[in-house]
Image: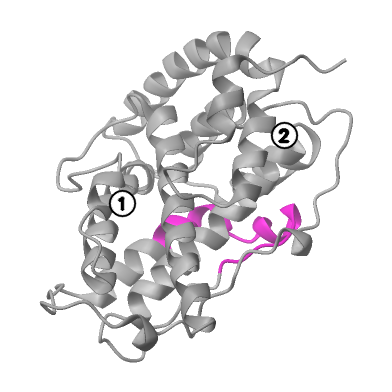
């Protein structure tokens, strides 16, 4: 029988002060109900944190660099299909769509022309097998480089003039994720097991860039805040100051807060888009 949620979690379920889509909140709360998060995670987090720092040290040695992107993709997709819970897989798929939408919105309203949009909108686990985990970061860096130096217009763009040409609204019915009895791992346990694979199977520069890419959250928030005229957005970014490069310390929390930030930004922009449609 399912245990009753604590008083705090019951209250938290109704806290919509930070706008996020109800579907994402329900998935996250169901993930929090997973007993593995509360029993297994402290041990896995300690073990894999130590292992991660050992791999990080090894990869930083002056040795020939190696990577195995295809193997990394196959291993993580296998892991997702067989061990990761349905809720976690759906949250991962949502994250791709949310971040792709946010970056495409930024590009479309930047004043720059002929920028190639980000096309990562997987609908099932197998869609992620073709370099999606590696390209997820590389596409972000590509778009930032192509956007060039950012210039504040001084005035926000009127809502009815915002460009949504590459926006793809997230619809949960479009996702095809099947559940198996072996899929028992929650989001955070899954990530602590992923992170060592990433560190080992990417070059040291690729991995360093990937774990520092979270800090662009603040830059994204600053730019979008100027586009839509909401100065509070930069405060919502947990990961900040992208010029200060960090290592793998506290990686799990920074990764999770990056996910929350992207869900927040997506819900904020989707709300504006729907508002303009009904005007």
Name the foreground residue: 125 vs 111: 111
User: Between tags 1 and 2, which lies in front?
Assistant: 1
x and y percentages locating residue 37 in the rendered image: 62, 18
Q: Position of residue 147 (x, y in %)?
A: 25, 76
Q: Position of residue 77 (x, y in %)?
A: 70, 46
Q: Residue at x 43, y 66 (%)?
A: 269
Q: Main secondary structure of the magenta part?
A: helix
Q: Is residue 35 magenta?
A: no
Q: Residue at x 76, y 40 (%)?
A: 86
Residue 219 x, y percent position in the rendering: 23, 57
Q: Is residue 133 magenta?
A: yes
- Label 2 secondary element: loop
Please give left or right for residue 260 compared with residue 119 in the image: left
Q: Is residue 75 visible?
A: no
Residue 175 appears anywhere in the view: yes
Count residues near mark 1 (Cα–Cα under 10 Å), then give few for <14, some for 14-19, many for 20+: many
Q: Secondary structure at mark 1?
A: helix
Q: Earlier in the sequence, mark 1 or mark 2?
A: 2
Q: CA distance from mark 1 to mark 2?
A: 26 Å
Q: Which mark is residue 97?
A: none
* Label 2 neighbour load within 10 Å: few <14, some 14-19, many 20+: many
User: Which mark is drawn over residue 217?
Assistant: 1
* Residue on which disc 2 sits: 84
């Amino acid at each position: 029988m399912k245990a009753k949620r604590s008083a705090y979690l019951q209250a938290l379920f109704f806290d919509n002060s930070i706008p996020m889509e109800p579907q994402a909140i329900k998935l996250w709360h169901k993930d929090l109900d997973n007993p593995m998060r509360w029993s297994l995670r402290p041990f896995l987090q300690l073990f894999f944190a130590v292992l991660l720092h050992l791999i990080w040290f090894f990869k930083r040695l002056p040795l020939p660099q190696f990577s195995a992107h295809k193997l990394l993709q196959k291993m993580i997709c296998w892991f997702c299909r067989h061990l990761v819970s349905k809720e976690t897989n759906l949250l991962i798929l949502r994250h791709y769509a949310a971040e792709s939408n946010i970056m495409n919105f930024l590009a479309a309203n930047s004043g720059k022309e002929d920028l190639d949009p980000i096309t990562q909108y997987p609908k099932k686990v197998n869609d992620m097998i073709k370099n999606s985990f590696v390209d997820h970061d590389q596409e972000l860096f590509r778009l930032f480089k192509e956007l060039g130096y950012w210039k504040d217009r001084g005035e926000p763009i009127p809502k009815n003039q915002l460009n949504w040409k590459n926006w793809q609204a997230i619809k949960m019915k479009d996702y095809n994720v099947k559940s198996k009895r072996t899929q028992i791992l929650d989001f955070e346990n899954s990530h602590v097991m992923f992170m060592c694979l990433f560190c080992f199977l990417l070059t040291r520069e690729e991995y360093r860039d990937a774990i520092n890419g979270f800090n662009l959250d603040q830059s994204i928030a600053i730019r979008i805040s100027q586009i839509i005229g909401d100065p509070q957005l930069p405060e919502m970014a947990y990961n900040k100051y992208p010029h200060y490069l960090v290592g793998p310390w506290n990686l799990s929390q920074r990764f999770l807060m990056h996910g929350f930030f992207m869900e927040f930004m997506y819900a904020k922009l989707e709300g504006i888009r729907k508002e303009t449609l009904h005007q």
